[in-house]
Amino acid sequence: MTTIEDYRRFIASKAPPGADLADGIECEPSAGLKAHQRNCLDFALNARKSAAFLDTGLGKSFIELEFARITAEETGKPSLILTPLAVAGQMVREGEKFGIDARQIREQSEVGAGVMVANYERLPKLDPDAFGAIVLDESSILKSFGGKTTTALCAAFRGHRYKLAATATPSPNDHMELGQHSDFLDVMPGPEMLARWFIADQKKMGAYRLKGHAEKPFWQWVASWSRCATLPSDLGGDDAGYALPPIDREMHIVQADRMIGAADDGLLFRIPEMSATSFHKEKRLTLDQRCGLAAELATHDAPVTVWCETNEESARLAKAIPDAVEVHGSLSPEEKESRLLGFAEGKYRAIVTKPKLAGFGVNWQHCAHAVFASISFSYEQHYQAVRRSHRFGQNQRVKNDIVISDTEASVWEAVRRKSQDHDTMKQAMANAMREAQQFAGLRIAYGDRVPVKFPAWLKSEGID
């Protein structure tokens, strides 16, 4: 026999799963935490499995280290922080600054007690079951739906009691990234998230958009297992010192020779095609001009980062720029790490590399000048490269020199448009999250808000 209480329990069971705040850790974290960091850490310890979507420079490393330290003490097992290449050593130094003993490891035999830090590349050499907690630094590595790294991380740490995924505020329109985080944190599989709140966008092949009625419930659900902030005030902190001055951005245009290759198509002048599949071919035609100008801009006495897109560009730039060290894909992980850390420590004046190699996680506040010898359609990679220097702790005005050919105007315009869209949507996400976080972790039981009079035939079945 079904009663109204049975029905209420049935409706309540349909609420999407979020963080369970009933069985967290109560402790006294470091007094050095700022208000927004303390807010995020408290939530992570209470939720046990959560995400920290904090923009660059808001102190994710301190939160990660404290979470790892406290969970190691709670579980009696070491905690593991996985980081991008070259960030492991940086994380250990951050720990020293905050009085947290963290050790960089490369394989299981090096694991001891407390906080262990390793690069993602070392995961196959580690035993996930040996760790009581897992922290993913720059967890946007989970972005690739069904990718080998994502699959390996989810499988390795499935069911671990304590998890923290930390990354800069994800792009609000990259919902798959949120789904991958939810899956890693054992909250909800990505495909189920899409089925519940999204609909396939017929205008954009393979893309999804939120159902019209689902926006508020979706962000309330995300807020139940994450904390999101663009500025400290989003989490009750003080924005003083975090509002950086605008970047001094200067465009440098080189002229492409439109006669080269035109005869092959039976034309007097070449008509450039800057699509995502053909723009590398167009770029090769202006490689010498762009790299020459970029090298001139990077030749001075101050530290400078020089960003490029291809190995050929990288080699040309490294040869032309005095005191430059090159970081490219064919180097061993150890050599990449050594060179990236060497630049951070001031051993090298200039560094030449690609955003996909060094655009995530490293802190280069000592450098206030970046030269982009080449750009791509990826707004995320460009944004992350810019933010290596333009972040909290930077005490100089940052300058970006961007070198493009006149035929690349459409590429730069696409990056600018994505930047504007991202800023607009990120603000909308922050507003939605701020409202949702007021109720994060609360489960609102279903109740009959309007008095209901049941007919006699239902009452006769035992329902009152």
Image (cartoon, rainbow, N blue to C red):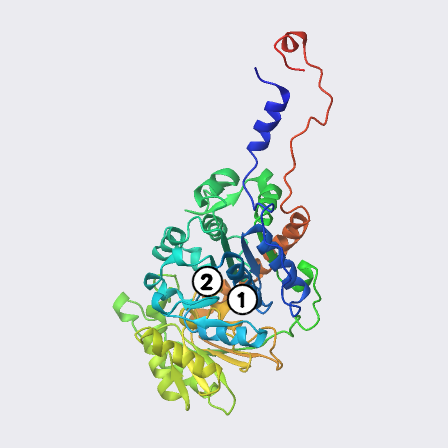
Q: Nearer the viewer, residue 361 or 459?
A: 459
Residue at the farthest front position: 76
Query: Label for residue 344?
Result: none
- Above or below residue 366? Residue 50 is above
Question: What SS does tag 2 mark?
Answer: loop
Q: Amino acid at mark 1?
A: Leu
- Image quarter (top left, top right, bottom left or bottom right) of the C terminus: top right
Q: Amino acid at mark 2?
A: Pro
The residue positioned farthest toward the left in the image shown: 264
Task: Give percent across and percent down for residue 239.
Answer: 69, 67
Q: Which residue is mark 1?
A: 65
In the picture as drawn, the residue positioned furthest to the right comes out as: 451
Q: Is residue 141 above or below residue 241?
A: above
Q: Position of residue 29 (x, y in %)?
A: 63, 63
Say which residue label 2 marks: 78
Q: Nearer the viewer, residue 298 or 107?
A: 107
Residue visible at 40% across and 52% down? 154
Classify residue 277 by image quadrant: bottom left
Q: Position of residue 275 (x, y in %)?
A: 39, 61
* Dot placed on the residue nearer the N-terminal end, 2 or 1: 1
Distance of mark 2 from mark 1, alpha carbons?
A: 12 Å
Q: Is residue 60 above or below residue 86?
A: above
Front position in the image: 25 or 277: 25
Q: Residue at x 58, y 17 (%)?
A: 2
How many numbered badges does the structure rendering display?
A: 2
Q: Can I make out residue 285 in this image? A: no
**In the image, is 46 to the left or to the right of 117?**
right
Q: Residues within 10 Å of mark 1 (few under 14, many from 20)?
A: many
